[in-house]
Each structure stands twice: as C-alpha cells, then as structure tokens.
Image (cartoon, rainbow, N blue to C red):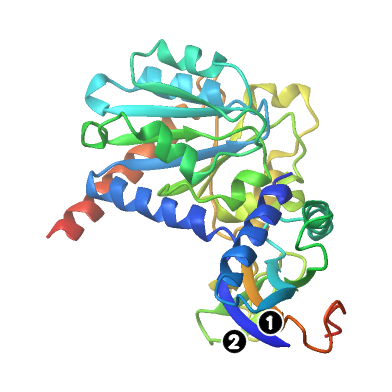
C-alpha cells in the first residue's frame, strides 16, 4: 500500500480558470463583483436600480445566472448596457467555465465594471471562485436575521453585506441590528449597507461603496502597471 | 446541492492521478473539508458512493477530514480554533485576528495498491 500526497484543491480546474479570468480582468482594469443571495432577496432589482444610476460612460456589463428563463436578462437589458443570461439548466451555482464561455464575445477593454448575478442560493456559489474582485451578499429583511449563522460560508467570504427591502421592516419581525451583529460574528468588520430599492433609501450608500471600490481598483491597476 | 459536482471533481482527480500508476488500483482518497467550506460531508459521501457504484472504482474508499476554523492573532501571534464564531484571541483578547484555516476543500492523499499484491480486494484498514 502506498500513500501518495496530493495536496491540491478539489476544484483546482475551476480555480485555474478563475485565476485566468482574474488576470484578464486586471489586465483590462475591469472590476468584477459576484453578487450572491437566496432566491428572491432582490439581486436583480438592486442591479436595475444600480444600472439606472450609471451612465454609458460607466462601461458596465452584467452576466446574470438562473437555472431557467431569460427573464432577468430581459429586465436588465432595458438599461442599454451589455447583458447576457447564463441559464445553467439545473446547476445551482455559476462556475468559472460558464463565465469564461459567456465572456468570449465581449471585449474586456471596453468594460470597467462587470456584475455577475449568481444563481439564487446561499450555499453552493460560495465554493466557486469566478475570478471576481469581491463577493457581495444580499440578505432581505423577509428572511431570518440568523441567516449569517446558518450559512456562514458566504457571509465569511463576502466583502459587503447588503440588507435589502428595509422598507418592509415595519411589517416583519426582523431585528436588523441582530442581523448585522450575526454577520459580524461570522465576519468581523464586515461592511454593511441597508437599502430599499422601493424607496431608494441606502442606494446612495451602495453607490458610494461601489465608487470607492472602483477607485481603489483603478489605483491598484495603475500601481501594477508601473 | 453541489456535492455531486464536488464528488465528480474528486473522482476526476483520482482517475488523472492513477494514470501515473498503471500497475496499481486506488483504495482510498483522502479529502479535507473546512467547516466554512459549505460542503455537507454526508451529502458528499452519498454522491460519491452513488457515482462509484458498479464502476471500476466501486471499492474506492472516501476518507473525509473536517478542518475547524482557525484564526491567528495579528497582535500576539497565537493560533486558535474558533468556537461559536468567537474570533477574539483567547490569549490577548484582540479582535484583530485573521483566518488561517476552515475553508479547505482539498485533496489530501491517495492510497494505491499494486495489482496482485496480497491485499487485493481488501479495503484499506487505515
């Protein structure tokens, strides 16, 4: 009997493609964000509001993942930015190969910002690196405030938590401070933004976060190219 | 439920690795799963068993090692296991600690046995 040490990641093939994507995003100065939540937390609505606030000078594009239908892409195409639907046909997450394939006919040099809206799922997407600069997790106030404790991985791996649908707070027994506390238990120092896409509350704060990230990313690119 | 995909990746890795050992067959594959990796070990085992059933790898054993979330204190350097999400350093109470383990999803080792050796057909006992 011989024991052969392997010492590599199970998803090394996914990680290899993700690393290639990350290098391409860096080369072209594209900030890529991977947006993850349960189904129905409001990822698409958040993106609609975000795209509405951006201008053509912002050079943004969206890849949106679902198991079936082009519905989300159709909603997002109204803002006249490049949008492509990824239908996984059953797979509960996006993987790096799907991103690579769907980016094939886009010129990255024409983009500054790429949103990837993952398949609605708090578990599986957390295992798959897509080459993004950061993960953003969305949690709506109609879910439980203990979700960060129940699904720690995605809260642990995301840079920003967006607490969405805060206009519903008067009608639901959701302790928003407890939700924030739980998220920071799993991920100390986690950045949190509270938004309502209906009233617009907090959207400016999200756009500011995005702006800061884009600035930081650009500065990083400039240092790297020197 | 992405454990099926993970099981498939593990088996792909086994088949790739076995090309280097044409005189042997694989007995046991060791994987490491962090408690923050969002993988259900029992679901992975179920998928793994289902995928090897009635194949050439039917006797392959899956050994799963669960890795706890570990942090290192940026202040005093103490390394500790995080319990109940409390990532404060137990030695100096600092909150400035960084994660150094717990999201593993790794292939650790593969045990192979030469065809025709005395233990052919027997499962690994280790």
Say which residue appears at 56% left-offset and 50% top-offset: A128
Q: Give the percent coordinates (x, y) of residue A7.
A: 57, 76
Q: Chain of mark 2?
A: B
Q: Residue furthest left?
A: A226
Q: Give the percent coordinates (x, y) of residue A16.
A: 44, 57
Say which residue appears at 66% left-offset and 81% top-offset: B80
Marks 1/2 in contact by CB < 8 Å: the verdict is: yes
Q: Give the percent coordinates (x, y) of residue B7.
A: 70, 55
* Mark number displayed over residue A70: none
A126 lies above or below B95: above
Q: Give the percent coordinates (x, y) of residue B62.
A: 78, 68
Q: Chain of mark 1?
A: B
* Mark number displayed over residue B90: 1
Question: B125 or A74: which is nearer to us?
Answer: B125
Tell me where residue B21 sits by quadrant.
bottom right
Tell me where residue B25 sits by quadrant.
bottom right
Task: Tell me which numbered mark, 1 or 2, is placed earlier along the sequence.
Answer: 2
Give the mark toward the camera: 1 or 2.
Answer: 2
Say which residue appears at 46% left-offset and 35% top-offset: A116
Q: CA distance from mark 1 to mark 2?
A: 8 Å
The C terminus of chain B - image quarter: bottom right
């Amino acid at each position: 009997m011989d024991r052969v040490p392997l010492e590599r990641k199970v998803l090394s093939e996914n990680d290899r493609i993700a690393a290639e994507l990350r290098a391409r995003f860096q080369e072209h100065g594209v900030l890529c964000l991977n947006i993850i939540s349960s189904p129905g937390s409001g990822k698409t609505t958040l993106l609609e509001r975000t795209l509405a606030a951006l201008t053509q000078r912002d050079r943004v594009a969206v890849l949106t993942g679902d198991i079936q239908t082009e519905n989300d892409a159709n909603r997002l195409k109204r803002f006249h930015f490049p949008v492509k639907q990824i239908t996984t046909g059953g797979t509960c997450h996006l993987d790096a190969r799907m991103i690579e394939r769907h980016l094939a006919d886009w010129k990255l040099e024409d983009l500054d910002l790429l949103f990837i809206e993952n398949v609605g799922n708090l578990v599986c997407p957390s295992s798959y690196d897509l080459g993004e600069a950061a993960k953003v997790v969305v949690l709506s106030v109609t879910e439980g405030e203990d979700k960060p404790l129940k699904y720690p991985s995605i809260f642990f791996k995301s840079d920003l938590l967006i607490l969405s649908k805060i206009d519903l707070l008067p009608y639901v027994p959701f302790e928003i401070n407890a939700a924030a506390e739980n998220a920071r238990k799993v991920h100390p120092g986690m950045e949190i933004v509270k938004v309502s896409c209906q009233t617009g509350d907090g959207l400016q704060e999200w756009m500011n976060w995005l702006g800061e990230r884009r600035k930081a990313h650009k500065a990083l690119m400039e240092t790297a190219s020197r | 439920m992405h454990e099926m995909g993970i099981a498939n990746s593990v088996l792909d890795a086994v088949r790739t690795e076995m090309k280097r050992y044409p005189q042997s067959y694989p007995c046991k594959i060791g994987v490491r799963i962090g408690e923050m990796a969002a993988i259900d070990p029992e679901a992975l085992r179920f998928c793994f068993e289902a995928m090897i059933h009635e194949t050439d790898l039917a006797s392959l054993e899956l050994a799963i090692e669960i890795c706890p979330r570990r942090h290192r204190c940026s202040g005093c350097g103490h390394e500790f296991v995080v319990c109940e999400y409390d990532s404060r350093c137990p030695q100096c109470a600092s909150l400035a600690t960084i994660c150094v383990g717990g999201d593993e999803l790794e292939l650790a080792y593969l045990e192979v046995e030469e065809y025709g050796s005395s233990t052919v057909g027997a499962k690994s006992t280790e």
